[in-house]
Image: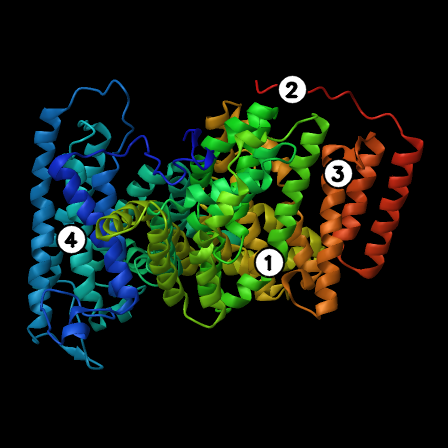
Amino acid sequence: MTSQLTDEGPVIAEGVDEEAVESNRRLFEGKSYIFIAAFAAIYAGFHMIALNGVSIESWTGIRIPLLPQFPLETWNFRIIHIAGALALGFMLFSASSFTDDDRAETKMLSMLGSLLIFPALCAAGTTIYFITLINSGELPVMSGLTTWPAFKGAALYNYEIYWYGLPLLVATLGAIVLGWFEHRQRHKFAVSDVILAVCAIAVAMYLIPIYSTAVRNSVGTPFVPIGVAFAATAGAALILELTRRVAGLALVVITGIFLLYTFTAHLLPGILAVDRPYSWQRFFGHVYSDAGILGPTTAVSSTYIILFIIFAAFLQASKVGDYFVNFAFAMAGRARGGPAKVAIFASGLMGMINGTSAGNVVATGSLTIPLMKKVGYHKKTSGAIEAAASTGGQIMPPIMGAGAFIMAEITGIPYQEIAIAAIIPAILYFVSIYFMVDFEAAKLGMRGMREDELPKFRDMARRVFLFLPIIILIAALFMGYSVIRAGTLATVSAAVVSWLTPYRMGIKSSVKAFEIAGVMSIQIIAVCACAGIIVGVISLTGVGARFSSLLLGLAGVSQLLALIFAMCIAILLGMGMPTTAAYAVAASVVAPGLVNLGIPPLTAHFFVFYFAVVSAITPPVALASYAAAGISGANPMETSVASFKIGIAAFIVPFMFFYNSAILMDGTTFEILRAAVTAIFGVFLLSSGVQGWFVGARSAWFIRVGLIVAALFMIEGGLVSDLIGFGAAVVLFFVQKVLKPAPDATIQVRGAD
């Protein structure tokens, strides 16, 4: 991203929409690139067609046998959704990072590894036999559905093991291990990755026809067919490996702990114990069902998340992201510490759409962080502000980084109700960050950016129509359109609006947008599927219910203690995980316990959701903060501590839900307005106390402590507590202005380091 001068004035943001290239992503050329680009575009386009129920037959009346007919059966759609992401992901993302001095190719190892293609093809080919068998009409029928007579000693049982199950596991596990040692040039396919892609397809080819029979009723029981257990085991291994490649080890390690718990729970004491051990066949048959991998997390990733990834890709292709950032510069760049305030607006807006805190830090932070350092913010503070603002995008309605849709799926609460409830909490969070960065700028005597450094506001105002896709999305949602229809309308409007800009979207650029969406979706789909494994463990073992009983016991001592404990568990589960996976796991473990305490489901899930989100800026494992530190050059741990300080309001706001439901729009108009006004005043006092800057001057330590205490009274939400907090603030104002106590220490202006 660069700054340059054009006829319209300076362009601050260029390339915000450009795709970040991960260190382990392959960069194909020629025919290989065309193949992968077509695969990604078809994969994303398939979802857009399937979600809207469009088919060639519905348009023309002509049925083409090889093409799927829509709408697809739910389980089949989710299986295809995961298999496509796995196949595309393995071919795109290497098992290890590429370096500038690429290691020599392991040609001999690749040749030996290519032998694994035979068991992979054997497994895939065997599925054709199963499909033929199911379509033959010779299998028994149960309740009008074809069943699957798998039992010990039967020829079919042995056939599943020796011609499908064992070859599939050998190919899958062998290719995963091979991938750790195989090295190919960045523009070439790796043999191991191609084998893993074939294995992913073989899993789907088996499960789709099998799950179309009455065998689905045996999922989660000891009677699940042995082939399902093999397919589920291979599928889980593929999901874990792809998650490691695209999201790091954190989620894989946490999932591994849950898997280990499943098979050792009968040996553990107390609330962690189960009555009897689970067999391998029963567990993996359970985990690859709608109680696990194919459950709520994949339900959301296969519908809402990928739909909004496509929407974001169309915005990216039409360069709307650049406009969002430039508009933020034109609006806020002149204020003291201008780039920090631009980061709040731009990162919040972009983060709401792209659904990942760390990814948004990379996209907008590469521009805002250097500019923050330039005007005087310390490098760790620059990174912390960007991390906190990007994280806030996950709690900003209407999209909330897909969090609102996951919450709606899990709780059954209408999306519109969730989006409306999120308004005041989001305002409190961003107002708090604004105060924090403004007070920091005031302490350091910073200036804003000069007029000639900024885009001209009148030029930005002429293109305000670029906000239309967002406006259409919000309007459609609140007019009662389904999320899918609203997202589709917004996506189409993004293409139409681009016709009024230099970046007109035609067929070629639309296909490119679908390609971008296909690639962008891989990480979140892998993460959601991996989180589904954890959800499957929780549903099978019942550990969530036992955790609920523990919370009930703590609540008998103190409800506040129970909430603090729930907060710590939600943050701990979310550390190192993207927001969607963090919330999905925490919602399975923590939220049921809070509901059992008598807390309304919406309040309980918002409580969990907030702490799952802020785990991205909570030390010691803070993904967003670490990403920002990589750009700012600061120490990652120092940056995460600073981002925790800047986002401190997010750790207090959830407790407000419990004490004052009006914050979530639950109450009369007067109650809601009073709660909003007093809470905003409370976060102002909190920011003043944390930053040590009150009514235009630095504060003494006792005033800072008094401001924080007064803030907590204001935030609590009761009439008496509001009066106490307001009275304390008036006294502190008098002390600061009249008595003028000496501040803690002299704060000198620091450079950009």
> Residues under labels 4 and 2: Cα distance?
59 Å
Task: Count residues near mark 4 (Cα–Cα under 10 Å), then give few for <14, some for 14-19, many for 20+.
Answer: many
Q: Nearer the viewer, mark 4 or mark 2?
A: 2
* Residue 388 visible in the shown view: no
Quarter of the rendering containing residue 378: top right
Q: Which residue is mark 2?
A: 750
Q: Are marks 4 and 2 in contact (CB under 8 Å)?
A: no
Point out the tag, 2 or 3, that comes first from the N-terminus.
3
Secondary-structure class at tag 2: loop
> Residues under labels 4 and 1: Cα distance?
45 Å
Q: Are marks 3 and 4 in contact (CB under 8 Å)?
A: no
- Image vertical order of residue 305 relative to residue 138, above or below: above
User: Label 3 sits on what residue type?
Assistant: Ser
Point out the tag, 2 or 1, that comes first from the N-terminus.
1
> Residues under labels 2 and 1: Cα distance?
36 Å
Location of the N terminus (image quadrant): top left
Q: Which residue is mark 4?
A: 202
Q: Which residue is mark 3?
A: 688
Secondary-structure class at tag 4: helix
- Residue 273 in the image: state x and y as whole percent: 47, 53
Give the left or right position of residue 254, taking residue 94 as reference: right
Q: Which residue is mark 1?
A: 423
Q: Nearer the viewer, mark 4 or mark 1?
A: 1
Q: Residue furthest front?
A: 7
Point out the tag, 1 or 3, that comes first from the N-terminus.
1
Between 21 and 96, the one lying in front of the other is 21
Q: Are marks 1 and 3 in contact (CB under 8 Å)?
A: no
Residue at 24% x, 31% y: name it.
180
Secondary-structure class at tag 3: helix
Give the left or right position of residue 125, taking residue 431 as reference: left
Residue at 72% x, 53% y: name it.
679
